[in-house]
Image (tube, helix red, strand yellow):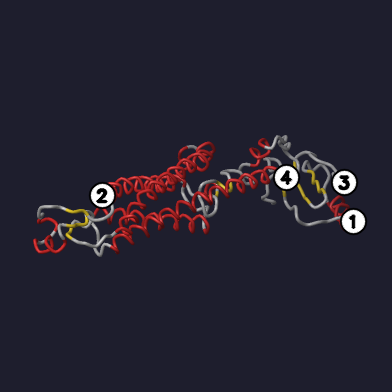
Amino acid sequence: MNQQGPPQVYEKKRRSSAISYIPNSILRFLQFASTSIVLGLIAFALHSYHNHGSRRANFALAVGAIGVFYCLAVFFLTLIAPQLVLGGIFLIAEIIMTLLFLCGFIVAAKVFGQHSCGTHVVSSYNPAYGSFADFQSTGGQYDPFKGTYTTKSYTNACRSSKASIAFLGLAFVLSAICCILIGIRVLMPIIRDYGSSGIWKSGTSIGAKLQRATGLDLSTRPGRTYGTGYRQDVETAGMPPEEPGVSGMTTQNHRVVDQHTLSTGESTTNTYNQEKYNEPQGVPNRRVESGNTAVNTGINTARGPNTAVVD
């Protein structure tokens, strides 16, 4: 049986998916780019300072690394198997990433943003910054981020770490937008057709697929394949539903046997005649064969060109 629904319905879906694919792809690309920049900036800053940074600085670095991994995972998973992603788990993962970006933004603003770039000078010795000999050799200059006496200015490293704050904030905003889109374009259609339990089912079981490479929309709506949601597609397109008993629908008293073989001409007529002579009289069942379809039904439901009815 043909599994394709009404063409105008699917054409409308394809146009809608194609229109949303471009901005969704840009959104995901910006999210990946911002997290990659965060990872690069903080890594460069910590490397330039010649230390491994504090725990809070390393946390901001880890957030950038996790964000890059997550963006790549979403891209490849939705590209290869968009029907296997569970909508509820997908939204939870996106929310977790949003909260991580928010925490990373707050931590980075505290660690990197509270000090100005360049060295500072103190007039009195502070043992927390190093030895007294270092204090004398540097003239009391110290780096506020490293917290040590030094005459070296880590201007580039400092500016890189401060720039990471802005990109962490951008990553948070983009991730929050992704959460909203997933809730509106992915979960709401599933909940509307299957209830809240549908968000914990894979796309294979509900007939839905996530938009490839982004996961921010449904390329195939749930229950819209021919045979599961066909009548909904017909009603959506403004087309009257087919009457029971006609070709294309399956009802209790109507069984479609074959719609792919073609039998016309003399051979069909001979077959009908042979069946007519061999069929006993008084049999209530009537056999209707129309073109390339053989149907067993209790009543004569359809006649058309090349239709033979044998009593």
Q: CA gap, disc 1 to disc 4?
A: 24 Å
Q: Position of residue 183 (x, y in %)?
A: 47, 40
User: Hey, which quadrant is residue 235 in on the image?
Assistant: top right
User: Hey, which quadrant is residue 50 in on the image?
Assistant: bottom left
Identify residue for label 2. Answer: 115
Element type at mark 2: loop
Q: Nearer the viewer, mark 1 or mark 2?
A: 2
**Mark 4 crowd level (few <14, some 14–19, many ≥20, 10 Å Cα):** few
Element type at mark 4: loop
Identified by mark 2, the residue type is His
Q: Which mark is residue 81?
A: none
Of the numbered discs 1 and 4, the one sitting upstream in the chain is 4
Q: CA gap, disc 2 to disc 4?
A: 73 Å
Q: CA gap, disc 2 to disc 3?
A: 87 Å
In the displayed orientation, state which residue is furthest to the right. 266
Q: Nearer the viewer, mark 1 or mark 4?
A: 4
Q: Cβ–Cβ below 8 Å for labels 1 and 2? A: no
Element type at mark 1: helix
Q: Which mark is residue 305?
A: 3
Of the numbered discs 1 and 2, the one sitting upstream in the chain is 2
Q: Cβ–Cβ below 8 Å for labels 1 and 3? A: no
At x 49%, y 56%, the residue is 75
Identified by mark 1, the residue type is Gly
Identify residue for label 1. Answer: 265
Identify residue for label 4. Answer: 248
Q: CA gap, disc 1 to disc 2?
A: 92 Å
Q: Nearer the viewer, residue 66 or 64?
A: 64
